[in-house]
Amino acid sequence: MDLRQHYSRFNTSSTPKPQAITTALDVFHVQASILCAKASDVEIWIRSGGHSFEGLSYVAQVPFVILDMFNLRSIDIDMPSETAWVQAGATLGELYYKIANMSSTHAFPAGICFTVGVGGHFSGGGYGVILRQFGLSIDNIIDAQVVDANGRVLDRQAMGEDLFWAIKGSDCLEIPWINK
């Protein structure tokens, strides 16, 4: 995949450019990127696989690097428990497609723009057209895996309820969906 098509925002000379773009293939790359950025005293901006409505993952007024999660896009659905683990790089469209292929009676409350990455959508609240009946995406997230500033991979139990409540989404999410 040619990354330049995803980063057309850098075409003007006045646009701040990242010092590097990392495309993680697994959680170890995420950990290394975070630790390297921390050691180099640069900010790290996360792009979670799809486009960003606000474009906030592409520019900064300070030295920064981009950690692009588009390769981390697995979606594992468990029909008996009516949950799914979704990596941050998957798009809403990929999530909806996978659910639809598994069931004609299940759904997940999220947005209508299929090219938005789930990591950003969920951690930003995740509003969508069925939110009045089923809530925001974050209201339906029951576990998450994140990499903290020290490179540790934390799940809900390891991070504690306060941090889980605060982030409600990130690198890999386990989500229940709605059964009509």
Image (cartoon, rainbow, N blue to C red):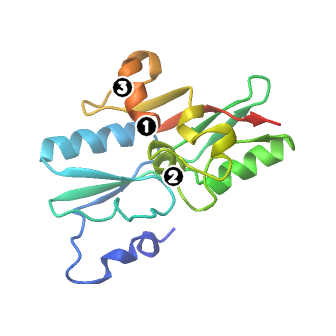
Q: Secondary structure at mark 1?
A: helix
Label 3 Cα crowd, 10 Å radius (few <14 / some 14-19 / many 20+):
few
Going from N to C along the chain, the mark reached first, 1 or 3, is 1
Give the image quarter of residue 22. Answer: bottom left
Q: Secondary structure at mark 3?
A: helix
Can the viewer see residue 71? yes
The residue to which callout 1 is attached is 27
Label 2 Cα crowd, 10 Å radius (few <14 / some 14-19 / many 20+):
some
Going from N to C along the chain, the mark reached first, 3 or 2, is 2
Q: What's the mark number on residue 13?
A: none
Q: Secondary structure at mark 2?
A: loop
The residue to which callout 3 is attached is 163
Q: Nearer the viewer, residue 124 or 23?
A: 124
Q: Quadrant of the C terminus?
A: top right
Identify the residue at the far bottom of this view: 12
Task: Report the amino acid beneath label 3.
Answer: Leu
